[in-house]
Amino acid sequence: MMSTHERIGRPTICWSAEGASGGAEPENILFPDDAPQGAEGIHEPAHDRQADSVKSDEETAPGKAGDGGETTPDEADTVPEDGKYTLAMPEGIAVDEELLTALGPDFRELGLTNGEAQKLADRFIAIQAARAETRGKAWGETVSKWADDAKTDPEIGGRRWDGTVRDSRRFVNTMGTPALREYLEASGGGNHPELIRIFAKAGALIKEDDPATGGAGGAGRPVDPAHVLFPNDAPKG
């Protein structure tokens, strides 16, 4: 994925750049119940966020206040002598004060007024939102294709798919942690055919009735999780 830290403000465009999904969330084929639920977990359509995140001409006109502070009509038409610009940000976006402080002297040297700097900021936000939507849509399509490829894979898909999912879940639930499941959901990696393949193979080696012994039926010493994945590396004797 491209960097999610292309931003004009912290947590600002970070939110715009990485939050846009470009559509519905890809299916989580191993743990569908782990899909985000509720208002905090559901991504709203990126085009709606883009429309909400960029203020109208009336809202950003000189004299309107925003998260960046108050701007009077006179200030909007003034080039700050000290290079300290006041920008009004859309709701949910904060000014990156460090970046603004660094660019302020350059803006002043170019003769930009507060109003002109505001127009640049508004335009940048709109461009970043559009880029985020495109990236989010492309990534969602990639994760969805992984799921389709896994379901039709000749080794793990087709008629074997139900068993593949069962074995994969057994391995993740037995040897993994909640943090692993969270990662698989957040990254989309749980849909990748090669991860599912290795999870299923490892899960098939574990008996559900005695996972601690790797299917030894209670006999012998517990099996190291690493040796379930790499049985040939297990110590002999």
Image: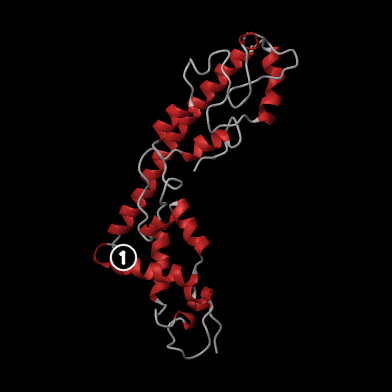
Residue drawn at x 43%, y 70% as measured from the top left: 171
In the orientation shown, which residue stands out farthest toward the right? 82
According to the picture, the residue beneath numbered tag 1 turns out to be 155
What is the three-letter code of the residue carrying label 1?
Answer: Glu
Q: Is 171 left or right of 85, judged from the image as shown? A: left
Residue drawn at x 54%, y 40% as measured from the top left: 4
Rendered location of residue 106, percent (x, y): 69, 18
Q: Is 221 left or right of 86, judged from the image as shown? A: left
Above or below residue 52? Residue 155 is below
- Residue 96 occupies which quadrant of the picture? top right
Give the SS element for disc 1: loop
Above or below residue 66? Residue 49 is below
Q: How is the image coloured?
A: secondary structure
For the question of whether residue 130 can be seen, the reply is no
- Residue 45 occupies which quadrant of the picture? top left
- Residue 31 occupies which quadrant of the picture? bottom left
For the question of whether residue 17 can be seen, the reply is yes
Q: Quadrant of the C terminus?
A: bottom right
Q: Is 122 left or right of 102, judged from the image as shown? A: left
Rendered location of residue 150, percent (x, y): 33, 58
Above or below residue 213? Residue 155 is above
